[in-house]
Amino acid sequence: MPASNVQWPLPLTRFPTLWPGQPGVPGTDHDRGERMHCTGEIFYVDPNYPGATDLRDGTSPTDPLATVTAALTKCQPYRGDVIAVMASNYWYVGADPTEGYTTPITEDVIVEVPGVRIVGIFPSSPIGVPWIPGTTGGTCITVNAVDVLIEGFSFLDSAANNATAIHAVWDGAPNYGDNLTVRDCYFDARLDYGIRLTFSYYAHIHDCRFDNVIVTAINDETANDSDHIMIHHNLFMNCGNAIKLPGVSQGHIYDNWIYGDPSVANSFIDLTGGTRNVVANNWLGCTLAAGQYNLTCSDATSGAWIRNHCIDGETGAPPA
């Protein structure tokens, strides 16, 4: 399962006895905090920590911030900053109040700082740190910056209110949502969309699980704007549409597993109008003999479809 793969090496430690803190600001034992980078800081987020507040410094695990939004205000472009988000007891069937830690991340955040890593720290969970939208029909993470990495989260919408987990979008220069990496995340059945892309190039989506996402798991919003995308080692289970990227060019889609309704047109891999793509070694829950491959996947002009696997055999050509 995805979240178990999140790599979290021990950061460099600081020594509070050598660097006294800033009076009145908890957690400022060192102006750099704990680091895994020459200049970058680690900002800890845990809304369940006793006394957690956004007035803290956030660079000490014993003085975390309460929100990801506050942590983003402290990040700087390409400094190597990391936002480390702690786990909660939340689950869509309800949390046990006697165990504490019942508050999930409940935010609609906008990332406008390039070069930031946002990571859920939940090594005992196979699906990651719970994150639900902050508003009805909201988007958990909107990415308006280049080179953002998101990993280790379980995106849930318990109310099924037409929410989106992640949306990478160009919001006018210089706010490009390019080079997005999403890995080791879980996308729940109550979401309308898992990952939406609007003029976002070079996205890299891998080792995620999409369960019964209502409309589309990975979706190109406007066509012709998700070029150079890489999608691999993901599991798609009963999504309305799995991979829907009309007009994409020079993408690489490989080693994914897709199960769904084989009677729904273009619901597995839809590259209608695309060019120069490589689609290889995907495992598809449809048949060749009954024409389901040609129905669920599209289309013959979109590039090289190389040895994908259907229930009754291996493909030898692109879908019609």
Image: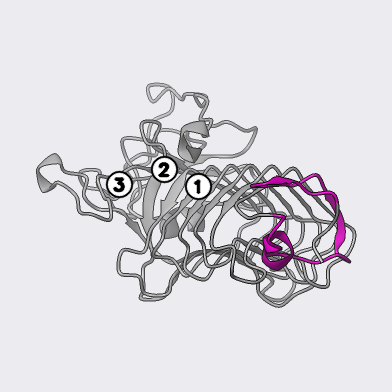
Instruction: Assess disc 2: are there few (<14), some (14-19) or many (≥20) residues with their C-alpha within 10 Å of its C-alpha.
Output: many
In this rendered view, identify the residue nearer to me: 57 or 307. Answer: 307
Query: Are the residues flagged by discs 1 and 2 in contact, CB closer than 8 Å?
Result: yes
Magenta includes 312?
yes
Tell me the kind of residue under disc 3. Answer: Gly
Q: Is residue 76 left or right of residue 129?
A: right
Magenta includes 48?
no
What secondary structure is marked by label 3?
Answer: loop
Residue at left offset 88%, top offset 64%? 275
Q: Residue 277's image quarter?
A: bottom right
What secondary structure is marked by label 1?
Answer: loop
Residue at left offset 60%, top offset 52%? 285
Tell me the kind of residue under disc 2. Answer: Gly
Q: Earlier in the sequence, mark 1 or mark 2?
A: 2
Give the percent coordinates (x, y) of residue 133: 38, 66
Instruction: Report the residue marked by disc 3.
Output: 24
Instruction: Report the residue marked by disc 2.
Output: 128
Q: Earlier in the sequence, mark 3 or mark 2?
A: 3
Q: Quadrant of the C terminus?
A: bottom right
Q: In the image, which residues are magenta?
A: 288-316
Tell me the kind of residue under disc 1. Answer: Cys
Instruction: Report the residue marked by disc 1.
Output: 185
